[in-house]
Image (cartoon, helix red, strand yellow):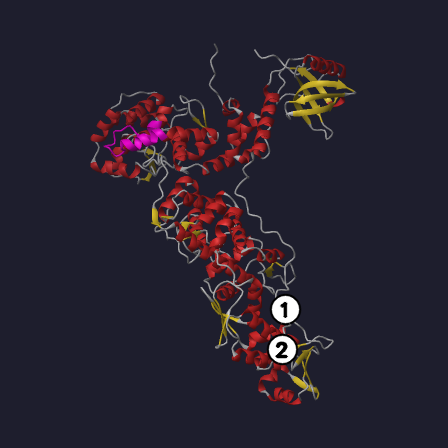
Amino acid sequence: MGTTTPPRTLAEALRARGDDSLAGLLRARPDLLNPVPNDITQLATRAGTRASVVRALEHLDRFALQTAEALAVAPDPAPYETLLSLLTGDGLDDGEQHDDAGAAITAALPGALATLREQALVWGEDDRLRLVRTARELLAPSPQHPSPTGLGPTVAEATAGMSPGRLQEILTATGLPATHDPVSAVAALSALFTDRTRMAELLDSAPVEALSVLDRLVWGPPYGEVTPNPTPPVKWLRDRGLLLPVSTRTVVLPREAALHLRAGRAHRVPEPVPPALAAATERDPQAVDRAAAGQAFTALATVEELLKLWNGGGPTILRAGGLSVRELKRTATALDVPEPIAAFWVELAYGAGLLASDGETDERYAPTPASDEWLDLPAADRWTHLATAWLAATRTPGLVGGQDAKGRALSALGPELDRSAAPDVRRRVLALFAGLPPGTAPDPETLLRRLRWERPLRGGPAPAAPAAPSPGGPTSGGGAEGTDLRSRLALWTLNEAELLGITGRGALSSQARALLEEGEKAAAVRLAPLLPEPLDHVLLQADLTAVAPGPLERPLADMLSVLADVESKGGATVYRFTPGSVRRALDAGRAATDLHAFLAAHSRTPVPQPLSYLIDDVARRHGHLRIGAASAYVRCDDEAVLNEILADRRSTGLRLRRLAPTVLASQADPGPLLEALRDMGYAPAAESADGDVLITRAGARRTPPRTPPVPVPEGPPVPDDTLLGAAVRAIRAGDTAATVARKETPDSPSSPGPSGALPRTTPAETLATVQAAAMTGATVWIGYVNADGAASQRVIAPVRVEGGFVTAYDHTADEIRTYPLHRITGVAELAEEA
């Protein structure tokens, strides 16, 4: 019975894997698929490149990373017991490492090692574990890049280049026998530092001050500066090799000595178990759903108001892109929210494809045609559209107000707000929410601690005092100082989820759970009963106001927004009728009789007499003056009105002059002239060149059809099962073609292979060989040159040979192909396996 030979390289270890294991590697590290490797050797080479290894390390959790860091400072190769000892310690640290912690590490280590093996960062059997060279270089200690474990170089590394005389001095000071062989001297010193008994005796004889120096270096960084004349404690340590020179002014604590002082542990605090989420509050799930639905309704109303605000053409776009600070302030004032929250709503509408640039010379933001379709949807469907866009968006409005790496201000809708990690952080935060019982709001500090455990290399220093989520909205770019981007994204996610109605009172709502687990339709079904039904009426009051006791049906809301101004919002919206608002309705083409009929049809109270008088009075004066283009002119049948305008000092800047008893001409444009006369208290109407009154209707400006901004992906997309299966088959087939044994022919190279020449045979020999293979079902190796002149090696199983073509199953491509015989450079039979 044969024995399995241990793999000598990463390629051999990958070659021994099953197809499912290879697919798992490609799923975990999708960058290896671009393009699909030709064979296993190329896959192993690509898996060891620096960029790919860095990406793989960034996706490890803290304990898997700690396991890799321990292997980086362990001997290469290292047995499983050595790795376990580096994580648990030797138990001689005065009880600092508790038994339960050691048991947790022992239980978690196989899983962490399996993760590292699956991602091809570790290979080899348990008795010879090897960390890939690139990962060892990234994680191993050096003066330029200290190890994450805080350990320094080994005695052998630190004494490389040290004179034999200096080594003899160290051996003599430590009481070791002298030797003239530097290798033996280094081995003796290393053996001393790894011997618990002798090392303890040596440290017992050390001055107290020397032990204090070691305490400062033991957990890293292990490097320290010394003066030309060091203090006696430092001199005592240096003489005995407990501090070894790196340069004339720098010394280092060797790894073996540090591990003794650490009781054998590579990490001060191993973390085999993810931190648990603590509950900040627990609420009634139904109350959470109602609160979230109320906020969802507010979110819809805010986005609708934003679209209405920019309906006729929004703010201009900065030359560098985005909104100016002044325009953002105007928008925030109009929406009655702080500027950071206004930036969130603007970015949300933009990310959902409801706002875009109009593409004109004087470029402005405006609603898109998709916004009209969105407004026609039921309220629950409108919310799921916004929530889905938010989940996938890489835009991060929390950065608005901050600065980029060059010190330039980051503006809303600007080009520098994309962060590819944002969707992953949002979904992970909500997944942690979903793992809690319904109605439970997690503690933000424990949430951040959990996220940093899951992605430690993407984390930074923990925030001094993480702020709890508040309905106040996302903080500005200057907020959350001292935190890493991932933690800041998590805090912004908490605030934005509350604003959008994903969460209610800090807990995940059932409609959001449905959105995450079942999709948009299920979420809309859950949300719809919780949203208020739109009303078809208002309550008119004698003080020229109308009260909407709830959301209004869209035609009623649209008309009322033209006829009246919003005075206050809340559970009920209060509209106020003014001469200006009534004139606005008349400018839109409504007659006074239309307005009276509209109010009578939609009011649950009688139309107050003051409101009727207001409409009739404004309608009586509306259009009495006519403004046209001269540059501009004023026309009125009442000469007294024109005399009054000419006599008014406020009209001096308009430079008016009388052309006829009923006509005044002005050098101002019609638009400014219209506004100036309205400011003077008149009610002029614009007219066309034909003398007809111009009707101005809101909502005429739309951008060309625009697609929503595509989120910037974080790295390559995760391949689906179909692609993975095809990739594994292609790699296997290519590996077969590259590694299979071939029979030599008189005209073929002695060692054909990936690095050898293509097989060369005569056309007659080629034809005879493939015909024989087709009859016997054998597999052959061919050299092939395609129509573009590209040469390749292939392993094929001929099925039919006729008409100058060979039809065969191509193991390299894993499909049936037909090859012209004249393009085959040669053919060689494959040697049978021993």
Tell me the distance, in whole angstroms, between the alpha carbons under discs 2 and 1.
Answer: 16 Å
* Residue 415: % across, % down: 55, 53
Kindly identify which residue carries mark 2: 674
Kindly identify which residue carries mark 1: 697
Residue at 61 percent across and 79 percent down: it is: 619
Q: Give the mark, 2 or 1, whose residue is nearer the N terminus.
A: 2
* Residue 144: % across, % down: 41, 38
* Residue 487: % across, % down: 42, 47
Q: Which amino acid type corresponds to the residue marked 2 in the rendered image?
A: Leu
Q: Is residue 314 magenta?
A: no
Question: In the drawing, does residue 183 fall left or right of residue 596?
Answer: left
User: For the magenta stretch, what is the residue range?
Assistant: 84-107
Question: In the drawing, does residue 189 fall left or right of residue 685?
Answer: left
Residue 238 lies, with reference to residue 408, above or below; the image says above
Within 10 Å of the Cα at label 1, are there few (<14), some (14-19), or many (20+) other Cα atoms?
few
Residue extending furthest toward the top: 1
Residue at 62 percent across and 77 percent down: it is: 674
